[in-house]
Image (tube, helix red, strand yellow):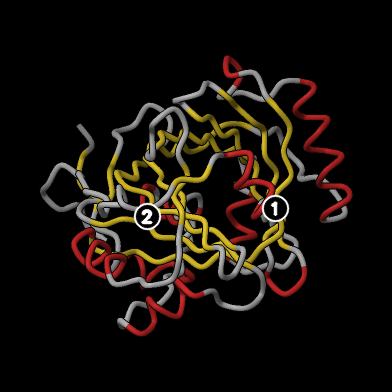
Amino acid sequence: MSPTPGTGEAMLPNLAALPPIGLEELNAEAALQTRVDRKYVVPAATARQVLATFSSRARVLEMDGLRSFAYDSVYFDTPQLHSYMLAARGRRRRYKIRTRTYADTGASFLEVKTEGTRAATVKERIPYGIADRSRLTAEGLLYISETLATAVGGVPDGALGPVLETRYRRTTLYLPESGSRATIDSNVTWQAGDGRPWVLAGSVVLETKSGSAAGPLDRHLWQHGIRPSRISKFATGMAALHPHLPANRWNRALRHSLHLAPAA
């Protein structure tokens, strides 16, 4: 993967005609803290065309008149990059630790993601002070320790510190037919420490979140020749910004799907 010229701007499909759904109703209908995630890196123009022909009923998350929301995540790892290496080597008991901040509302959470049975993702989280989003407090470290002890049987050696920040704008769809949800992320930006931020140019990351069976949007994408990409905002971002890291699991995406440009 090599940086390409451009601003990284990616226009979302026009979703104005879809009926809205509020956050409380969405969480009641499709909380999906345990789910199977399928990710697709799709050129923005293709995403607009494919979603325009998606005939299944869908509703779009709307809050205070907004349908697109700014997300900011800070990922934590040990000096030995224990979390990253587990992902790079495909280990079963892998995990991710991050803070997630919803910039439009000011809400912030500390999240621990682990892999459950049948490749399902299990996400657990607690409210977290926005002022602490880039560091781990004593309370946060205790939560991580207790969660990992239960989920993967132990905690990593070494102090946890911030290693990567991601930012993007997200639109969320609710798919009543399958009781699942999908997200469309644009202007996906990665930054390591004080280094230069890089933005995914010209494409969006479309992610379906459902049970073990593929949902209607997955099948629609497949019918149009769009297949899932092996991509993780954490691991693929780390590999992109640190080329010396082992990245066999993401080489195809890094070479063919991700075109980065300097962020404004």
Viewer-proximal residue, 150 or 71? 71
Which residue is identified by label 2? 243
Tell me if residue 7 comes above or below residue 184 in the rendering.
above
> Residue placed at 52% from the left, 56% from the top?
174
Q: Which mark is in front, 1 or 2? A: 1
Q: Residue at x 67, y 56 (%)?
A: 32
Amino acid on which the number 2 mark rests in the picture: Pro
SS assignment at label 1 = loop
Packing grade of label 1 (10 A; few <14, some 14-19, many >=20) is some
Of residues 83 and 97, the one nearer the viewer is 97
Q: Label 1, label 2: how many angstroms apart (C-alpha)?
A: 32 Å
Amino acid tagged 1: Gln
Q: Which mark is residue 248?
A: none
Compared across the picture, whether 60 is left or right of 86 comes to left
**Mark 2 secondary-structure assignment:** loop
Q: Residue at x 61, y 31 (%)?
A: 161
**Residue at which label 1 appears:** 33
- Along the line of sight, the residue nearer the viewer: 204 or 189: 204
| Horizontal side of residue 206 vs 111, given as left or right | left
The image position of residue 59, as x and y in percent, is 46, 54
> Percent from the top left, x then y, of residue 20?
45, 45
Q: Position of residue 151 (x, y in %)?
A: 83, 54
Dots 1 and 2: beta carbons under 8 Å? no
- Residues packed near mark 2 inside 10 Å, few (<14), some (14 to 19) or many (20 plus): few
Q: Is residue 210 above or below residue 148?
A: below
Residue 9 percent location from the top left of the image: 20, 44
Q: Is residue 116 left or right of residue 14?
A: right
Q: Residue at x 75, y 27 (%)?
A: 140
Q: Is residue 168 visible?
A: no
Residue 135 seen anywhere in this rendered image of the structure: yes
User: How many numbered dots are placed on residues in this image?
Assistant: 2
Q: Quadrant of the C terminus?
A: top left
